[in-house]
Image (tube, helix red, strand yellow):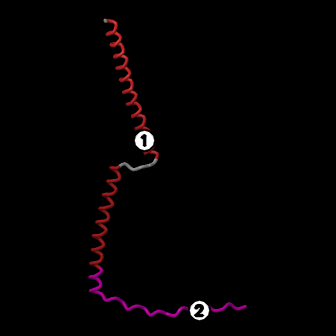
């Protein structure tokens, strides 16, 4: 009876060692895959999310500033039009026809 328990104990130790080894291999494979994916992203020249968000915020701020300046220019043009009359448009001249070349 004693030998049966010893065999089971040995089998349990082997199984435990195999599970530990497989868990270590799983972690190693995950690390290798993560490294390969990161390398792929770096080679693809992708932008990190935080940099993308920063540039998007800068673009939104620039757009808002541009809209404010457009309104300000329109208001200044309206004031300028009210103060100074527009010059009369120039009369259009007939296009000049080229002279035929002498032979």
Tell me the quarter of the image containing the N terminus. top left
Crowd around label 2: few <14 · some 14–19 · many ≥20 (10 Å): few
Q: Position of residue 31 (x, y in %)?
A: 39, 34
Left or right of 29 in this view: 95: right
Measuring 30% from the left and 87% from the top, which residue is drawn there? 84
Number of on-image labels: 2
Residue toward you, 2 or 59: 2
Instruction: First in sequence, mark 1 or 2: give its number.
Output: 1
Left or right of 101 in this view: 88: left
Q: Up-down: is 69 above or below 19?
A: below
Range shown magenta: 77-103
Q: Position of residue 48 (x, y in %)?
A: 37, 48
In the image, residue 102 lies in the stretch drawn in magenta? yes
Measuring 30% from the left and 75% from the top, which residue is drawn there? 73
Q: Magenta part mainly helix, strand or loop?
A: loop
Residue toward you, 20 or 45: 20
Q: Residue furthest top?
A: 2
Q: Position of residue 55 (x, y in %)?
A: 34, 56
How many angstroms separate mark 1 from mark 2 (CA)? 70 Å
Describe the element under mark 1 as helix, strand or loop: helix
Image marks 1 and 2: residues in contact by CB distance under 8 Å: no
Measuring 36% from the left and 90% from the top, which residue is drawn there? 87
Q: Quadrant of residue 101?
A: bottom right
**Residue matched to label 2:** 97
In the image, residue 101 lies in the stretch drawn in magenta? yes
Left or right of 73 in this view: 21: right
Q: Position of residue 36 (x, y in %)?
A: 44, 39
Q: Up-down: is 5 above or below 59?
A: above
**Residue matched to label 1:** 37
Q: Residue furthest front?
A: 1
Describe the element under mark 2 as helix, strand or loop: loop
């Amino acid at each position: 009876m004693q030998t049966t328990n010893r065999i089971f104990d040995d089998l349990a130790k082997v199984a435990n060692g195999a599970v530990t080894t497989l868990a270590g291999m799983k972690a190693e494979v995950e690390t290798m895959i993560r490294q390969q994916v990161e390398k792929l992203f770096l080679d693809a020249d992708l932008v990190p999310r935080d940099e993308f968000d920063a540039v998007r915020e800068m673009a939104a701020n620039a757009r808002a500033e541009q809209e404010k300046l457009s309104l300000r220019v329109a208001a200044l043009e309206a004031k300028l039009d009210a103060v100074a009359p527009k010059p009369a448009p120039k009369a259009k001249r007939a296009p000049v026809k080229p002279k035929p070349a002498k032979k």
